[in-house]
Amino acid sequence: MNHLPDFIQKLINEFDKLPGIGPKVATRLTFNLLHRKDDLKSFADSLNEAYTQVNFCTQCFNLTDEKLCSICANPHRDKTIICVVAHNQDVDSVEKTGEFNGTYHLLNGLLSPLEGITPDNLKIKELTQRIESDGVKEIILALDQSMEGEATAIYLSKLLKKYPIAISQLARGIPMGANIEYTDEVTLSSALKNRKKL
């Protein structure tokens, strides 16, 4: 039988839903915050602000509080090159290299039939619409070096072959099984510079 008040258990349960946080860490975070009431208020305000203001860029599907994210709205970015990534964190990782001046397209996941994630669940149709209407010349596939990432890259390269565009993939400097988000900037920078045509 649970001896904790409901509001504490609810908070623990919410932390427990986050990736990489189990019940013990969720409990520790909850009690740490509850003992720092000013920080708890600030945390709650930030979560509420994120909830009310966050939405997806209408062009690339990155998180933003505007219609277009700061990258898509930047007139100095090369709109003819699109770097296709799976997750929001991947945009940040590629941006830190300083090697890319194009725009992005977030798939919001990777193909994974075992988990029920098919092409219809990803922003693939929206990518083809951008290629058809925006004068795109090159697509860079910057996807995780995993079974799902590889399957997604193969699917996209076959699908996009019908368009008169260059299709490239990050060089193999990124080890199999690695996530773009956790790849160091030097390795990611090298992979971008040495990307290969598909």
Image: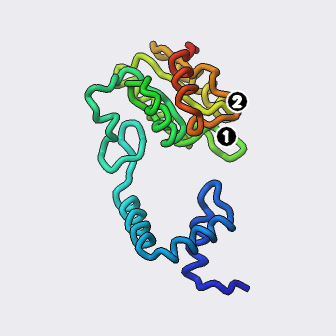
Q: What residue type is labelled 2?
A: Met
Query: Which of 124/143 is in front?
Result: 143
User: How far, Cα to Cα, is label 1 from label 2?
Assistant: 16 Å
Instruction: Name the disc covering residue 176, or none.
Output: 2
x then y, percent, for residue 179: 62, 37
Farthest left residue?
A: 75
Q: Residue at x 65, y 55 (%)?
A: 20
Q: In this view, does 148 lie above or below 78?
A: below
Query: Which of 154/11 is in front?
Result: 11
Residue 141 picture quarter: top right
On screen, residue 5 versus residue 114, left or right, reads left
Q: How crowded is mark 1: few (under 14 residues within 10 Å), some or many (20 or more)?
A: some
Q: Name the residue under label 1.
A: 112
Q: Residue at x 53, y 18 (%)?
A: 168
Tell me the element at label 1: loop
Task: Identify the image quadrant of the N terminus.
Answer: bottom right
Q: In this view, does 108 lie above or below 8?
A: above
Q: Is residue 126 above or below residue 121?
A: above
Q: Which residue is drawn at 33% across and 50% down?
A: 65
x then y, percent, for residue 171: 60, 19
Q: Is residue 49 above or below residue 116?
A: below
Q: Which amino acid does label 1 sit on?
A: Ser
Residue 81 picture quarter: top left
